[in-house]
Amino acid sequence: MTVRVQQDRFDLGAEVQGFAQGCNTSGAVVNFTGIVRNTPDGDLDRMEIEHYPGMTQSALAEIEAKAVKRWSLKGSLIIHRYGILRPGDMIMMVATAAPHRVDAFESAQYLMDYLKSRAPFWKKEFTTDGHQWVEAKDADEAALTRW
Amino acid sequence: MIDVLYFAWVRERVGLPREQVETSAATVADLVEELKARQERYAAAFADVSALRVAVDQELCAFDTPLAGVREVAFFPPMTGG
């Protein structure tokens, strides 16, 4: 069970490889990666991600602990970046390991749903026209009701 | 004394990331009213509290949460992680 909040890039391949190797009682590993999406016009210069140091780590650990318990996970990993990111950069990843794939898929979705609206991160987009805070979507909040 | 923190556009509107506030407010909502009465920039940041979230001692809470014994209150817009 690992949570990392960092400014630095991470190596997705190495992270997933290391995670999977450490989980030999699991038959299934699922991973999800979030990437900085450019605008339809392709004019995104950068995204700045702000977070609440102190609360971020504990909020993520709490979300993770609930998933581990509910799906009896053998392992889980959350990496989330902050700071200045460019289009195409990886923002974050989650990985889950379970004996069978349904639990690995479901728990990864659960982690993502809670991470979206319960982890203290805020994104600001800078385009050639100006800048704006990314607004939370009603659909993200609604997604939590299925759990 | 309570440490009050602001994030994202709340921080931008208030004009600072954190400050220490001497207050006798009983609840978060009372603290918000005190801050709004201070200056226009606070009134602008807290104009619509339904657009805001609050964490008390780093736990998400409701605006009627009591402040007795609390060290840190943070105000911010809905979170956009992931």
Image (cartoon, coloured by chain):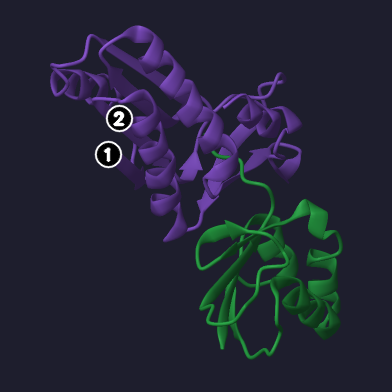
Q: Which quarter of the figure is the C terminus of chain A placed in?
A: top right
Q: Disc 2 is attached to a residue of which chain?
A: A
Residue A124 visible in this rendered orientation of the protein: yes
Residue B51: which disc? none
User: In purple, which chain?
Assistant: A
- The residue tagged 2 is A76
Left or right? Give the position of A29 relative to B30: left
What residue do we see at 64% from left, 56% from top?
B8
Residue A2 is labelled as: 1
Q: Are marks 2 and 1 on the same chain?
A: yes
Position in image of residue B4 (x %, y %):
60, 75
- Disc 1 residue type (three-letter): Thr
The x and y percentages for residue B28 are 70, 72
Of all chains, the one bearing label 1 is: A
Q: Residue A142's image quarter?
A: top right
SS label for mark 1: strand
CA distance separating discs 2 and 1: 6 Å
* Element assignment for label 2: strand
Q: Residue at x 25, y 13 (%)?
A: A99
User: Which image quadrant is residue B53 in?
Assistant: bottom right
Q: Is residue B56 above or below residue B52?
A: below
Q: Nearer the viewer, residue A87 or A138?
A: A138
Give the image location of residue A101, x and y in percent: 35, 8
Q: Are marks 2 and 1 in contact (CB under 8 Å)?
A: yes
> Residue A116: x and y, percent?
57, 35
Categorize mark 2 by other alpha carbons within 10 Å: few (<14), some (14-19), many (20+): many
Placement of A112 over or under A40, stated as above or below: below
Q: Colour of chain B?
A: green
Displayed quadrant of residue A53: bottom left
